[in-house]
Amino acid sequence: MDNHRSGENLSSEVVKNCKRFRIIPTGPEVVLNETPLHKTPASDSPMDSPMSQDSPIKNEPRPIGRKAAKAKRGSNSTKNASKFLKEISKHQAMRIEMDMKQQEHDRAIQLEYAKEREYVRNEREYVRQQNIEKKDRETITMDTSHMSPETKQFWKLERRDVMRRRLFCNDGPSNMDWLNDQNH
């Protein structure tokens, strides 16, 4: 035990003159029978005392503790994570908007192509119909007076086919006996 007490005395002697462990009086020195115990300066704050202003120890801010540092780090990482998530959601919303605009653009282009294809198809159909009508007119107006009887018979049958197509294309077959009449 003596070794333990001597170690305490030795360590207190070492720490006695160290700035960090020096005791700074904050008020007037209290002495029995000379100064009343309750007499204090006008200011209650220890920072305003004249002793603390002349003190060789500088008032540095106290270092943050481990728990507080961990809590602070956690809150910062949470703030950073929330900022990061907000940025991600913002970029994702922008990406979705861009994709929607691209889809609308693609649909508009497809619609234009469909219109063009329909126009070309209609134009081709019109030209085809015009060619058929031209051929039919030529067949109907064919002069058979200088042809052989077999060739006349061929053109007569062709005229009949043209007349059937023209007269009954939408009605379907009806009474067409008058076309089979030999007088025509």
Image (tube, grey):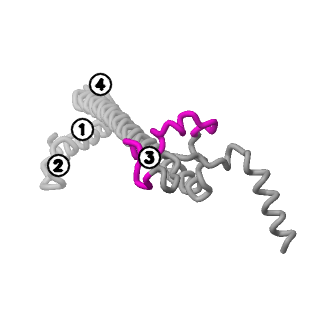
Q: Position of residue 170 (x, y in %)?
A: 17, 49
Residue on which disc 1 sits = 159
- Prevailing SS of the magenta stretch: loop
Mark 3 or mark 4: whose residue is earlier in sequence: 3
Mark 3 or mark 2: whose residue is earlier in sequence: 3
Q: Nearer the viewer, mark 3 or mark 4?
A: 3
Query: Does the residue at mark 4 contact the one at mark 1 (Cβ under 8 Å)?
Result: no
Query: Label 3 crowding class (10 Å Cα cut-off): few <14, some 14-19, many 20+?
Result: few
Kind of residue at disc 1: Arg
Q: CA distance from mark 4 to mark 1?
A: 17 Å
Q: Nearer the viewer, mark 3 or mark 2?
A: 3
Residue on which disc 3 sits = 86
Question: For residue 57, which numbered disc appears in the image?
Answer: none
Instruction: Give the residues in magenta.
Output: 36-59
Query: Label 4 crowding class (10 Å Cα cut-off): few <14, some 14-19, many 20+?
Result: few
Mark 2 or mark 4: whose residue is earlier in sequence: 4
Query: Does the residue at mark 1 contact the one at mark 2 (Cβ under 8 Å)?
Result: no
Residue in view at x 46 percent, y 43 percent = 87
Q: CA distance from mark 2 to mark 4?
A: 35 Å
Q: Quadrant of the N terminus?
A: bottom right
